[in-house]
Each structure stands twice: as structure tokens, then as C-alpha cells.
Image: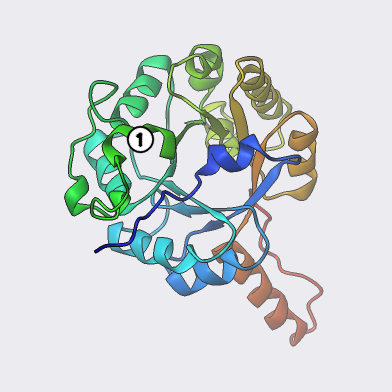
Amino acid sequence: MSFRVEPDPSLKDALRGADHALTGIWVCSASALNAEICAGAGFDWLFIDAEHSPNDLQNVLAQLQAVRGYPTIPVVRPPVNDPVVIKQFLDLGVQSLIIPMVNDAQQAAAAVAACNYPPLGVRGVGSALARSARWNRIPDYLTRAAETITVMVQIESAEAVSNVADIVATEGIDGIFIGPSDLAASMGVIGQQGHPDVVAGVIKSIQAAKSAGKYAGVNAFDQASARKYIEAGADYVGVGADVALLARATEALAASFKGESQSSAPASY
């Protein structure tokens, strides 16, 4: 007789009971070992990225398995807002998703549909074959799946900021995650995440989400910016990345043996 298995909490469960903004770290190295190290560091959530990192389905699966024993929430970004790709990540057991490059309510609705079984959506049924249902060991998974999944959509363009009120009003969206880097690029100030227009777009998006009763997250590797956005109402913030920390720390160590005071590499977030 098999064990009865219950779903793990997803990001919305952690946010619902939080009395502070949840801080998270990106895991971009495609390494289950690095993911496990980060999982034990004390962050509230891990951002396993498959859009700008060499993460594939098997790497993501290994990282989900590596971090499951730690009190942190794994959040995964698939590379594209596509129902086939999203279905594959969901079947791996991903329960918290950040869907990239969502620019309007129609694209937000498509993301919701991809994350839900019919009649709520278009997710294909393969629970008997999938880790998401623990191979049908989670009782009534098909009817309970929606309550186990968090759907965040990413606001990362000027178009998305202009449509943010409609996006956060989309039924089934749990919240948004704002990307200042792409937002800056779309505004014609690439590399200037602290530009006043970019900051205004981030704060406008946070306020729109809060007004709609949805969660707002933002990426801010610069600590001053992270704290500013938390003060503006951000519920969760990405504050660093495994690869960035390794890059800066190794540069600093090398420089310390060459008489250099600091790395010449520019900060980015």
C-alpha cells in the first residue's frame, strides 16, 4: 500500500501568512548542489530560472528534489508563456510559477489557462505519469490542483505597466513580479534600473496589484532599491543570484591578492 502524500505549500501560501516581505535568491547555475546550498541559507523562496539560465527540465527536477527538505519555497520561471512548456514544468511538480513577458490581460489569461485543468484551463491531464500528483498518490489531485499552484505573471515592459490594472484584474492571477531590467530596456534607458521612469513604473505596478488584492514582487539586487520597494508595498523581492554572488566574491578574492581595492565590474540588478 502506497503512502498518502499531500501537496507542499506554494508561494501564495507563504505570502498569505507572512508578516514581512519575503526575500528570495535566484538559482541560475543549473546546479542542484548550489540550489541546496541556497535553500539552507535562510531565504524565504528560491527563484529557479529557466529563461536566462541553462536550466532544463531535468535540471529543474533535480533542484526541486534537492531543496524539498528545506523550509523555503521553490519558484520556477519557464522560458516562455506557452501551454506546452508550462505543462511540462507543472508535471515536474513545480507549484509556483513566474510567467515571463506578460504584456496584457489576454496574455495573463493565457498563462492562467495553461496552469489549470479543464474546464478552468487547457492543461493536459497526465497525473498518473507525473511527479506533480506524485504519480496519483496525492488524493483527488485533479480536482485540487488549482489550489496547489501559484501563478505570478511578470511585468517587464512599458506596455505591461500601462496595462497593469487589467493584468492584475485577470481571474486566476495570484500576483505579479516586476522586472526592472527589461522594463528599463523597453523605456529606452537600458541598464538604468534606477532611472526615475523605471522606478515610477515599478511603484505604479506594486500599487495596482495591492489595490486589486493581489501580491506584488520585484527583482532588486541593489539593497537600497529592494528596501524602497518593500516600503512601497512589495510582498516578495528577489535580492541576489547564486552566479552573481560567485562572480563578485571570486573577483574580490582575486583582487585582494593583486592590491586592488574592489572589482571593476559594474553592479547590476
**Rendering coords of residue 198 (x, y %):** 66, 28
Viewer-nearest residue: 255 or 226: 226
Residue type at numbered disc 1? Arg
Q: Quadrant of residue 3?
A: bottom left
Q: Quadrant of residue 90?
A: top left
Residue 17 appears left or right of 261: left
Q: Residues within 10 Å of mark 1 (few under 14, many from 20)?
A: few
Residue 23 appears left or right of 4: right
Q: Is residue 231 above or below residue 169?
A: below
> Residue sitting at 38 percent across and 49 percent down?
94
> Residue sitting at 54 percent across and 42 percent down?
11
Residue 252 appears left or right of 123: right
* Residue 53 seen in render: yes
> Residue sitting at 24 percent across and 50 percent down?
136
Residue furthest toward the bottom?
A: 257
Q: Is residue 265 above or below residue 268?
A: below
Figure label count: 1
For mark 1, what is the residue?
Answer: 144
**Rendering coords of residue 2 (x, y %):** 27, 62
Q: Is residue 53 above or below residue 78?
A: below
Element type at mark 1: helix
> Residue sitting at 58 percent across and 66 percent down?
38
- Model colouring: rainbow
**Rendering coords of residue 117 (x, y %):** 26, 30
Quarter placement of the N terminus: bottom left
* Residue 100 seen in render: no
